[in-house]
Amino acid sequence: MQLHERLKELVGHEVFIRTLREDEKSDVPGGVIKEVGVDYLVVHTASEEKGGWAEHGAEWLVRLAAIVWFIHLHDCKKCVQDSVLQRS
């Protein structure tokens, strides 16, 4: 399975991404995957006042080739909702 195929399974889930950029302030803040293509993904970030990790809400287009690491927490809101629905 290729990376973009795996990432398509995580659409709607919260993620943290580190890219090749060294300046931390210009890195992608944590957000929710909105779209995945063969060589890119779109991450929607929410501002801290709306419960996110960014100064301002935005849509980030990230090249997959630029990703150094990718974290998907098992306690993301989508995973918690899915586990509650499975128990019901």
Image (spheres, helix red, strand yellow):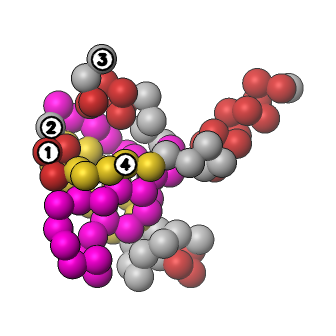
- Left or right: 65 in relation to 25: left
Screen quadrant of the N terminus: top left
Q: Position of residue 14 (x, y in %)?
A: 50, 51
Q: Secondary structure at mark 4?
A: strand
Marks 1 and 4, Cα distance to the nearest angstrom? 12 Å
| Position in image of residue 73 (x %, y %) | 56, 48
Residue kind at label 4, given as amino acid type: Phe
Q: Which mark is residue 70?
A: 4
Circle 1: residue type: Ala
Left or right: where does residue 76 sit relative to residue 37?
Answer: right
Return the mark for residue 1. 3
Q: Is residue 2 visible?
A: yes
> In terms of sequence position, does the residue under pointer 2 or pointer 3 come before the other?
3
- Residue 39, numbered label: 2
- Give x and y (percent) for residue 34: 37, 46
Label 1: element kind: helix
Instruction: Give above or below for 86 relative to 55.
Output: above
